[in-house]
Image (cartoon, grey):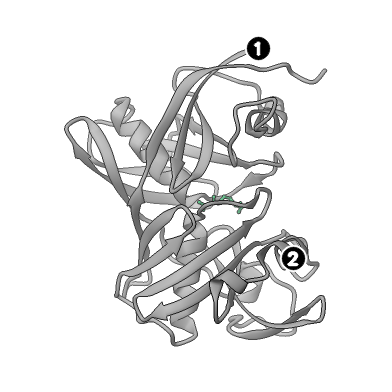
Amino acid sequence: MEIPYTKMHGLGNSYIFLDLFHFSIEEEMLADLAVQAANVHTGIGSDGLILIHPTDNADVGMRIFNKDGSEGKNCGNGLRCVAKFAYENNLVNKPQFIIETKAGNVTAEVFHEGDKVEEVTIDMGVPDLLRQEIPMRGKDNGRVVGESFEISHHPLEVTAVSMGNPHAVFFVDKIEEAPLYELGPMITNDSRFPEGVNVEFVEIVSEKEMHFRVWERGSGVTQACGTGACAAVVASILNGYSQKNTETCVHLSGGDLFIKWAADDHVWMRGKAELTTQGTFYWKRKS
Ligand SMILES: N[C@H](CCC[C@H](N)C(=O)O)C(=O)O
């Protein structure tokens, strides 16, 4: 099957995008297509698959599938790429518009030079902070801020934030010493997170700056995670390391994102979105 695709990335967090305004594909194919397209050896190579689709609920819709074929509910880097694609391909006719996600609608604004979008700002909405909203198992139903979280004999402290998808944030003294590869795969599948979890390690540099690494649910270590960067800034403020209504620079492996948790509780994300290539994926559907 010939699949027309566009590959884009947000700070190196790359996805294969399908434009379902001009192409259709059966629902039951999506998980296997995501796994095969993401395969760097026999496919195109990415952190997953994203659908840009028509919807009655917004200007455009986004669905995201991780590298393992699991469907996520939100994707910050993906949203900036969807916004870029929608504007540059005339799926929308204004620089500010609404994108539907499985976690609800968000507002995107593109900043363009000529007909090319260089940077996108997304209002990611209000984070969910109560234990059962993450979701996370535990004794009470309040917020999870600096809670003891022992794993593999490591006495950690976790702050849990949902941006429509679950995040477990851990603060470390030096980002280069974060146990990302050792504990990332354990925590992401830990039974305390019934739907799994994205795992972030953060080193605070100042009130307005942090270093960040991530083990993503369903994709492993990625160069960047937009919802994760939002969760990290919210967690930093909840722990008293940063302030609300102040734009914080998050240094991810693939570059910088600028995040603000505003006084009205909305989280704003600002960053780049870039086109890598377009082509045809000759997909051999598993029988
Ligand atoms: N792995 C995530 C989805 C992708 C999120 C990330 N790539 C971003 O930019 O927010 C999940 O299963 O919730």
Quarter that holds the N terminus: top right
Is 275 in front, or is 265? 275
Quarter that holds the C terminus: top right
Above or below, comparing residue 241 to residue 255 in the picture: below
The answer to whether the residues at label 2 and label 1 have Cβ atoms under 8 Å apart is no
Mark 2 residue type: Glu
Closer to the eye: label 2 or 1 = 2
Above or below, comparing residue 203 to residue 212 in the picture: below
In the rendered structure, which disc, 2 or 1, sits on the residue that comes first in sequence? 1
Name which quarter of the figure residue 31 lies in.
top right
Is 125 in front, or is 222? 222
Name which quarter of the figure residue 149 lies in.
bottom right
Above or below, comparing residue 263 to residue 271 in the picture: below
Is 177 in front, or is 120? 177
Is 189 in front, or is 178? 178
Q: Which residue is mark 1?
A: 1
- Residue 222 visible? The answer is yes
Q: Position of residue 54 (x, y in %)?
A: 45, 29
Name which quarter of the figure residue 38 lies in.
top right
Residue drawn at (50%, 76%), measured in percent from left and top?
A: 203
Tell me the number on the disc at residue 97: none
Above or below, comparing residue 74 to residue 251 in the picture: above
Residue drawn at (45%, 40%), measured in percent from left and top?
A: 9
Mark 1 residue type: Met
Q: Position of residue 183 (x, y in %)?
A: 73, 67
Residue drawn at (49%, 18%), measured in percent from left and top?
A: 279
Q: Is residue 78 left or right of residue 272?
A: right
Kind of element beneath mark 1: loop
Q: Which residue is mark 2?
A: 182
Please rate how many residues cluster around mark 1, counting C-alpha atoms within 10 Å: few if below 14, some from 14 to 19, many from 20: few
Residue drawn at (30%, 70%), measured in percent from left and top?
A: 247
How many dots with numbers?
Answer: 2
